[in-house]
Image (cartoon, grey):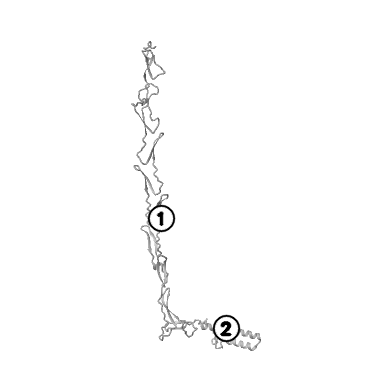
Amino acid sequence: MCYEKIKDKNYCFDPARPCFTRDCNPLNGSCVDVDNLCSNKNPCTFNNGTPNVFYPIDCTQGKKCIVSDCDRNSSNIYNGCSNKSVNCDDGSACTTDSCDNSTGCINTPKDCNDKNECTIDSCNKTTGCINEALLCDDGNACTIDTCDPANGCIFTTKDCNDSNACTTDTCDSATGCVNTPIDVTIACNDGSVCTSDTCDPLIGCQNLNITCTSGDNSTNNTNGTVSPCTVTNECEKVRGCERIEKCNTTVDVVPSCSIEKCDGDENNCKKEDNKIDACTIIAVAAGTALGVAAIVGIIAAAVLLTGGAAVGAYYGYNKLYKGEFENKNPLYEAETKVGKNQLYEDKK
């Protein structure tokens, strides 16, 4: 009983209960707890067992993504914490906002790449990602400008071929295709005045032979007979159309075996000098034949041992080649003592 010791205020002290003040209950004489010195009835503080020593409670418990507030009037006298998530919004539409309990708020820039090479990717803080179409104009009128999502801008050279063989196809970087008609007088000129130079759009230059006005002058004799000369108009590539006079082969001209040339003034055919005519050729052939015959005769005479025949053959051979027959050998003339060949003239 504590009555006897009532005057000793430390009598009821219990070291096992340091947070409490104790006193003697006069009704039954026992020691009882009076005040709890480790509680201040504040839910926002805590006591670690030391009387009258209080610490603010940590409502976040180390979590950086929680904002904690303590309500002293909370009905929970042991914990007045009111926890809320941290607002990590940085006010930019160009970031993705998140929170890590260890590090806190994370504001990661948004990836606005749409994987399209034909757009320009950017970001506006208010509206977010912008993917603007790429302008592929290279400023060259000679290209077709397009865009491939995988490779970006493509500048393809224009085909300026107008399928016209009579134009020169080029391109001007400022104005585009230029199809210039060719100068036919230069590009299609084949250097001949005997052709008409034109251009066909499908096949190109054309060089068509011109037609010279024909003129047949074979019946122009005053007596109405057929002239041995004919006149035709022919084209020479440098001089152009010109009158060509030729001997009419259908008219019998004396000598008939001569090579004739038409005399424009006399309107007649004349033997052309220094030429072998048909008569000469025949004479040479005849002389050669006689000579061969004579040689054959000599050989035959020798074989037959006939003196008269041999002499006759020799005499015939000698006469032939000495020009003593009426039909002289044209390859030999006794008067000049030289073998004058009409195929050759001694110019001495």
Residue for point 53% across, 83% down: 282
> Which quarter of the picture shows residue 213?
bottom left
**Foreground residue, 335 or 114?**
114
Residue 340 appears in the rendering: no
> Which quarter of the picture shows residue 217?
bottom left
Q: Is residue 249 left or right of residue 47?
A: right
Residue for point 63% across, 88% down: 309
Q: Mark 1 is on which residue type? A: Thr
The answer to whether residue 71 is above or below residue 168 is above
Where disc 2 sits, the SS reads helix
Nearer the N terminus, badge 2 or badge 1? Answer: 1
> Which quarter of the picture shows residue 187?
bottom left
Q: Is residue 2 left or right of residue 345?
A: left
Residue for point 57% across, 86% down: 320
Residue beneath disc 2: 289
Tell me the number on the disc at residue 156. Answer: 1
Q: How many angstroms separate mark 2 from mark 1 (CA)?
A: 85 Å
